[in-house]
Amino acid sequence: MKKYIAKIFIFFVIMVSLDVVVGVLSDYLVRNAKSGATQKSEYICEKTKEDILIFGSSRAVHHYNPLIIQDSLNMTCYNCGYDACGIITAYGLLRTLYKRYTPKVILYEVTPKFDCLEGDNFSFLGPLKLIYSKSDIEDVFENVSYNEKFKMKSGMYRVNSKFIQLITENVMNRNQTIQGFLPEDRQMNFEPENVAPEINENYDNLKVSYLNKFVELCKNKGISLVFMVSPSYKATNDAYFEYMMKFAEKNNIPFINYYCYKPITENKEFFYDVVHLNKTGADEYTKVFVSENKDFLMSLNK
C-alpha cells in the first residue's frame, strides 16, 4: 500500500514539475515568436503604441491595410483583428494593453455572429490564452466558462495543441502580417447561390455585456470608438446589422457602413470568398474608407 501511495506521489510531483516547465518554456516561446498569431498577440500585449487600433474578426484582419490608413491620416495604425474572433477577444486584448498605453482611436469592424448573436463563446479565448500569464483577464475566462479560471493555472493546458505552433513560429517566418493586416492573394472563382446572411434575433447576453464593457472602457480612457462594416459580395441589404446599428446609435458611436457599397460588392475580382476581400479588394476598400471619411477620422486625433 505504501509503495502504491509513493508511486502516486512521485507521479504527481513529475506531472506538476512538467507542467511548470512547459509553462515557463511556452512563456519564453511566446515572448520570442518571430511570426504568426503568437507574435501578433505578444505585440498587441507588450508593444503596441499606435494612434489607431483596428479590432474585429477576419473581416477586420483581412480588410484594412494600416499602411494606407496611416499614410493618409498621418496617424500610426495597427490591425488587431483575428480570424473568427469577436467582442470577447477584443475586450480581453484591450484590457491587456490599456494599462500600458492608450490609443487615440479604435476602429471596430462589427460582425453580429461574433459580437451579439448566440454561439460558441469558448473559441474566442484562443488568442487570449497565450498572454494569460501576463494579463489581468481571469474574469473574462471565468465568465465564458467558470472552470476555465482553474484550468488556466496549468501551463500545459494554456498551450494545449498550440505547442508545435509555438515552436514553428519561433523558427520560421510564417503568416507575416503588415502591421497586423493579413492580405489574401486568392480570388473567388465561383458564383455563390445565396450571399445574404441568415437574420435571427437570438442575442447572446454575454456578448452584449462585453459590448457594453468595451464601450465603457473606451469612454473611461478617452478613446474615440468607431463602428464600421466593410463590403460583402453582392450585398444589397444591411438588415443583418440592425441590432449593431441601434446599439451604436444608443451609445453615440459613429457607424460607418460600406456593406452594400456597389463599386466593390459588384466586383468578384475584389473577393476571395463571399464575405472576405482579397488583397486587391482590401487595398481598394481601405482607400475608399479613408478618403471618404478623412476629415472625420482626423478630427479624432486629439
Image (cartoon, grey):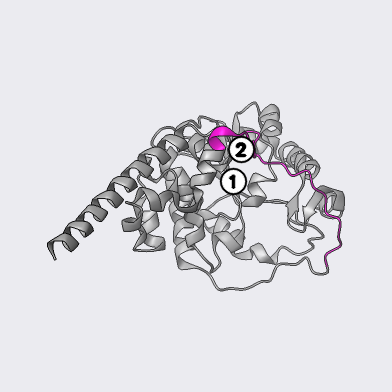
Query: Which of disc 1 and disc 2 is earlier in sequence?
Result: 1
- For badge 2, the amino acid type reads Gly
Residue 221 visible in the snapshot: no
Q: Choose top left, top right, bottom left or bottom right for residue 20.
A: top left
Horizontal side of 302 relative to 270 (left or right) equals: left
Check residue 279 in the rendering and tell me which mark sits there, or answer none: none
* Residue that label 2 marks: 180
Q: Secondary structure at mark 2?
A: loop
Q: Residue at x 43, y 43 (%)?
A: 131
Q: Is residue 206 above or below residue 126?
A: below
- Percent position (x, y) of residue 87? 52, 54
Distance CA(mark 2)–CA(mark 1): 7 Å
Residues 41 and 65: in front is 41
Q: Is residue 174 magenta?
A: yes
Horizontal side of 159 relative to 275 (left or right) equals: left
Furthest-left residue in this view: 2
Residues 112 and 252: in front is 112
Residue 281 visible in the snapshot: yes
Q: Choose top left, top right, bottom left or bottom right for residue 61.
A: top right
* Residue that label 1 marks: 81
Q: Which residues are magenta?
A: 169-192
- Percent position (x, y) of residue 13? 24, 50
Q: Is residue 169 above or below residue 82?
A: above
- For badge 1, the amino acid type reads Gly
Q: Residue at x 49, y 40 (%)?
A: 223
Q: Is residue 107 magenta?
A: no
Q: Secondary structure at mark 1?
A: loop
Secondary structure mostly seen in magenta is loop
Residues under numbered marks 2 and 1 in contact, where contact means CB atoms less than 8 Å apart: yes
- Percent position (x, y) of residue 22? 38, 44
Residues 70 and 118: in front is 118
